[in-house]
Image (cartoon, grey):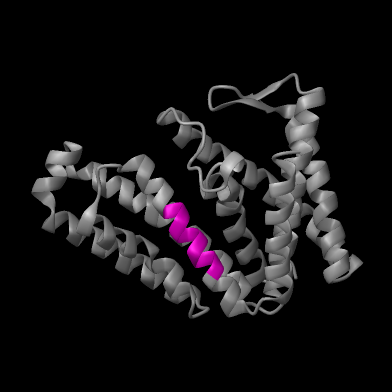
Amino acid sequence: MGRLIPGLIMGAGCLGLLIWGASLVISLVITVVAALALRELFAILLPELKGVAFGITFLATLLPCIGAFFGSLHALIGAFVMGLLCIVLISFRWYTPFTAWFGQVYTYLGSSVFALTYISLLLGHLILTARLTDGSGWLIVLLALTAGSDTGAYYAGKNFGKSKLCPIISPKKTVEGLLGGVITGSLAAAVAVIVLFDTRTALFFLPACIVLILIGVCGDLTESIIKRSFQIKDSGTILGGHGGILDRIDSLLLSGPILYYLLQYGVIG
């Protein structure tokens, strides 16, 4: 119950934002979430990075989300390239201290480029989705899909889980939990699509729904790889018993861009 109530409050807050918030406000909130997630990731990957070097690197890695405010995929990609260039130039400027802190400058380059791509570039696609026609509605569908999948996977895995899905990366995940998550996530998404759009759209969305759930699981496993590599349980403590921001958005990081491209190119919607 201690974890359920905060989870319900966060879910209600997200739902309220997507229902009543303007696309600009939604975009701003996503950018703030990206900034918090970047801070957590840098604390894991480059804890020695501080001061001016951290501040400039942080701003450089946030550029794709800022570019996405223009509502254009070209702006997002252009801002990503600018962020990449900034990171390279920063490595030139702080070559000597980076060598002293990290042993090799490529540690800084690899970690910063990963943060730029994994957090800001991927979350920038959610901002682009919010700027689309009916974009906030589809973000609600994605939220319902993710929450339904996580809930179904947890209870199915807890009660019926026997076959390990990927024991080296995430020992608690099971094949039964995955199947349960696909079923409940698909049902939750279908209900959301029927309420927000229509039954015909829900039928066309079902195959994409399954793909999005499976990709979301890959996103979850990606964060598990990072945490296992650094031997930490949660990415942060900002959400108390729910861990950090990264722990909450790991599934959305990979499924969000796929949803955007499905909408942008008329596969669904």
Question: What residue do we see at 50% from left, 78% from top?
Answer: 72
Question: What residue do we see at 75% from left, 36% from top?
Answer: 153
- 109 relative to 87, above or below: above
Viewer-side residue, 110 vs 232: 232
- 211 relative to 257, above or below: above
Tell me, yes or no, whether the highlighted magenta stretch contains residue 35: yes
Question: What residue do we see at 42% from left, 48% from top?
Answer: 40
In x, y percent, where is residue 16? Answer: 72, 68
Spot the residue most to the left: 96
In x, y percent, where is residue 251? Answer: 61, 48
Residue 265 visible, this orientation:
no
Residue segment shown in magenta: 29-38
- 40 relative to 130, above or below: above
In x, y percent, where is residue 206? Answer: 81, 55
Question: Residue 199's quadrant in the figure?
Answer: bottom right
In x, y percent, where is residue 193? Answer: 82, 64
Left of 137 or right of it: where is 121? left
Spot the residue most to the front: 2
Left of 113 or right of it: where is 218? right
Left of 236 or right of it: where is 138? right
- 179 relative to 53, above or below: above
Q: Main secondary structure of the magenta part?
A: helix
Question: What residue do we see at 38% from left, 40% from top?
Answer: 44
Quadrant where the image shows the N terminus: top right
Residue 151 visible, this orientation:
yes
Quadrant where the image shows the C terminus: bottom right
Viewer-side residue, 3 vs 95: 3
Tell me, yes or no, whether the highlighted magenta stretch contains residue 39: no
